[in-house]
Amino acid sequence: MNTMEKLRADARGTLFDKLEEQRVGMLGLVGSDQHMQPMTHYTDAASAEVWFITSSDTDLVRAVGLGVRAHHCVMTPDGEFYACLSGTLEQSEDSQKLDELWSPVVSAWFEEGRDDPKVTLLRFAPQEAAVWASTDSAMVFGLEVARANLQSDHKPDLGEHMIIRFDGG
């Protein structure tokens, strides 16, 4: 089953599967003059949460404060799947969640490892996600475009777009 078919069958499940596959996206604050920035995300599909580990001395953390609206956007390297999630972003003091997410890769970013006072956990609670999936076949793409050019009443079926809404958040 290709990504378009998976999205049609289970949009939310496909979103979280793709977030697991593509572990880096662009995170930005709504209404901020800051540019979006690349961030590694950690997903919890069961709770529909996305987590980030960063340093307290970043502009992002200073701007988050008690919670703000944010966007997190991802795309797969093959250009087959795109998503932009929007919701609330806040600092979290959940030490158990931080322990669960901690790894040698994360530790490399902090001089004192897990005990570095700059380690900051951010919790992103998506309220909705706009997702796009396109055909994974260059041949299908070419045939759909050719057919649309030959048949004026044919609209090419090259992808799927939908909005996923989350409860709460």
Image (spheres, rainbow, N blue to C red):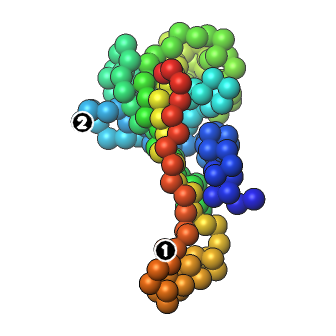
Q: CA distance from mark 1 to mark 2?
A: 39 Å
Name the residue that disc number 1 marks: 155
- Tell me the SS state at disc 2: loop
State the image quarter where residue 26 is shown: top left
Choose the circle earlier in sequence order: 1 or 2: 2
Q: Position of residue 109 (x, y in %)?
A: 55, 30
Q: Residue at x 62, y 44 (%)?
A: 11
Q: Residue at x 46, y 16 (%)?
A: 91
Image quadrant in which the N terminus is located: bottom right
Q: Amino acid at mark 1?
A: Lys
- Image position of 39 (left or right of 106): left
Q: Which mark is residue 33?
A: 2
Q: Which amino acid, by three-letter code, is at mark 2?
A: Asp
Horizontal and vertical percent position of residue 48: 60, 27
**Numbered-mark total:** 2
Label disc, if present, on residue 9 of the rendered structure: none
Q: Residues within 10 Å of mark 2 (few under 14, many from 20)?
A: few
Q: Of 60 and 166, which appears nearest the observer?
A: 166
Residue 144 in view, yes or no? yes
